[in-house]
Image (cartoon, rainbow, N blue to C red):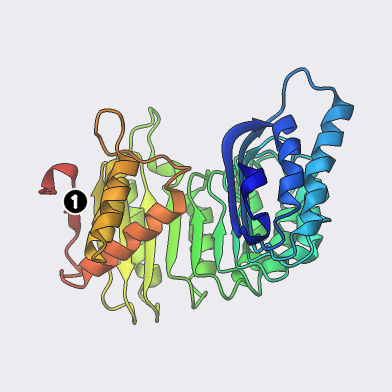
Amino acid sequence: ILDKLQLACVEEVEVNCNWTLSSLATFAPYLSRMGNLRSLLLSHVHRAASIAPEEQERLVLQFTSQFAHLGCLQELSMDSVCFLEGRLHQVLRFLRTPLESLSITDSRLSESDLTCLSQSPSIRQLSELNLSGVRMTRFSPEPLRVLLESVAATVKTLDLEDCGIRDAQLTAILPALSRCSSLTTFNYLRNPVSVTALEALLVHTVHLSHLSLEMYSTPLEVYGPQGGQQQWRLNQLRDKLMVMVESLRQSRTVWFTAATQDFIMCSRSGGQDAGWILLHDPPVVLSLLQVLYDIVQNRPSAAWTSYMGAAGSEGKIHSSSHRWGLRARGLAANLLCFRAKYTKASDPCVLTWHQIQW
């Protein structure tokens, strides 16, 4: 099929089919002919167990060297890609132009990879950086701090979900994060954070004037010895957050996820109109909100596509963190803000599956 295409006209490519390194290397010559390619997604690339280290290095170089031919590339996404750890420089050194969007998710990286990334000319104009699922628990905070400083002037969307970032690491990167003056969306879900560290984080993000959507997990102190949620601690945290955002002078949505419910604070301009929206059964609601948002935007065909894409084998709506992730939460926040315009901000709006009438 690829031999019959005018590859020079291709602008977007998605490789999402559980390829091995050998398959990816076979695809490499075709990639080199896509001179107008703007967006490339690689997903689930794995190595064969029997491959020798020398052969692996040869295959990786055979593929990554083709990036030198992609002079129009603006968006690069690599999800569950096996060969990146210790070799990210082999990808970056062949990039010819600055990227607008870089996504490296559910892949293993080393500290040296982050250092190399922070020094790469290809990130100097980056507006979106997604490192969700890249485990940094044992990393020194220095590479991530330097990376944030490198993109601070341009980054608008920052996704650090499920990176295993600890309180000490978070504290070290806060000054760099506070300099991301163009940031509009920040995802810090599924990182172990204490109430103290979260309050310090919010003190820094509250001054980012363009930030409109923030996402956090409930601190560990909210859960009891047996893992049960202590509602009074959750309410206490929520009240503290409300006090902190009262001084906001721009619209902002803060999303918290907990074991039994999600709660969202929508604060409109001036901080006078703040209110909580409680979501029970979050995975169901997340998927459903995609459908509802399309309906609100008068896109019935898109709504049907969203419904079919989210429905499982039993016809139940579900949501996976990888497919929906940040996009679903962003759509959810847009819909909830839309609804908030027609409800009293001081009254929580509770949505459950059974309250939706079809």
Q: Relative to 244, does residue 223 appear above or below in the rendering?
A: above
Which residue of the protein is positioned furthest toward the front in this rendering? 4
Q: Nearer the viewer, residue 297 or 343?
A: 297
Residue at the image point whose x is 76% and y is 37% from the top: 25
Q: Is residue 66 left or right of residue 303?
A: right
- Residue 78 location, x and y as percent? 64, 46
The local secondary structure at tag 1 comes to: strand
Q: Nearer the viewer, residue 190 or 96?
A: 96
Q: Is residue 223 left or right of residue 80?
A: left
Residue at the image point whose x is 75% and y is 54% from the top: 143
Q: Is residue 232 something one can see in this rendering?
A: no
Q: Nearer the viewer, residue 304 or 310?
A: 304
- Residue 196 location, x and y as percent? 50, 54
Q: Relative to 40, does residue 96 appear above or below in the rendering?
A: below
Q: Which quarter of the picture shows residue 294?
A: bottom left
Image quarter (top left, top right, bottom left or bottom right) of the N terminus: top right
Q: Is residue 62 left or right of residue 46?
A: right
- Residue 91 location, x and y as percent? 78, 50
Residue at the image point whose x is 44% and y is 61% from the top: 214
- Residue 255 location, x and y as percent? 38, 57
Q: Which quarter of the picture shows residue 163?
A: top right
Q: Is residue 246 something one can see in this rendering?
A: yes
**Residue ID for mark 1:** 351
Which residue of the protein is positioned furthest toward the top in this rendering? 50
Q: Amino acid at mark 1?
A: Leu
